[in-house]
Amino acid sequence: MKKIFLFLVLISLSLASFSFSISPAPGADVKVTIINVTPFAFCSLTHKGPYSDMTDVITELINHMQNQNITPQGPPLSIYLNAPEDTQEAELEWEVGFPISPHSEPQAPLRKKVWNHPMVAQAVHIGSYETTGDTILEILEWMEANGYVQDGPILGKYLNMPSPDNPPDKLRTEIWIPCKED
């Protein structure tokens, strides 16, 4: 069952393009909320390079997790450590991972980390991965208008995967931007 799940995640994610850009939003308002997040453990692979490398990095992540008998405890996630508009494509830093049991002990090259950002501005992006930047921009604008500043890297949780029942315009990605009051 674990191998089937990981295989399906890999296939689904490899069908999608993982680049995003931040551009003016098309006008659809995004519902942003501030939520409190309980810290959670995750294992990940960090990568430096273009988002077009995402499929290869996910394949490597899943292979290492399978070889180390580590079972995902939630949906796949990505964490963006710098912004595409401020960084050359070859210098983009990001990671992909899965929540894991706090008792799991991944070995290199996997890294066990803890998401320890207690307050995030959250919204759900509906649409292709290429347009995720529109939602990120709307969250950042909402934060500024409501007295919050970014306080950590952007996280994306993939709530569903591309499939015949989930075409790109139906994809759901939960976006978290750690924040604090300004």
Image: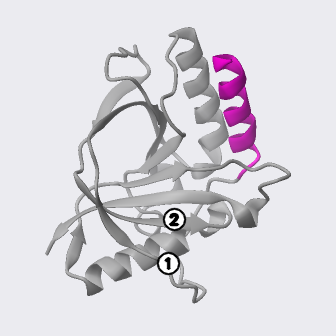
User: What's the residue at 48%, 53% (across, down)?
Assistant: 156
* Quadrant the C terminus occupies: bottom left
Residue 59 position (above or below residue 85): above
Label 2–label 1 contact, CB within 8 A: yes
**In the image, what residue occupies the spot 77% across and 55% down?**
166
* Foreground pick, 24 / 51: 24
What residue is rendered at 62% in x and 69% in y?
Answer: 131
Question: Is 122 positioned to the left or the right of 169 in the image?
Answer: left
Q: Is residue 142 above or below residue 69?
A: below
Q: What range is drawn magenta here?
A: 1-16
Q: Residue 13 location in percent, x, y?
A: 68, 43
Q: Indicate the amino acid at tag 2.
A: Val
The x and y percentages for residue 83 are 41, 62
Crowding at dot 1, Cα within 10 Å, few <14 / some 14-19 / many 20+, comes out as some
Q: Secondary structure at mark 2?
A: strand
Q: Quadrant of residue 63?
A: top right
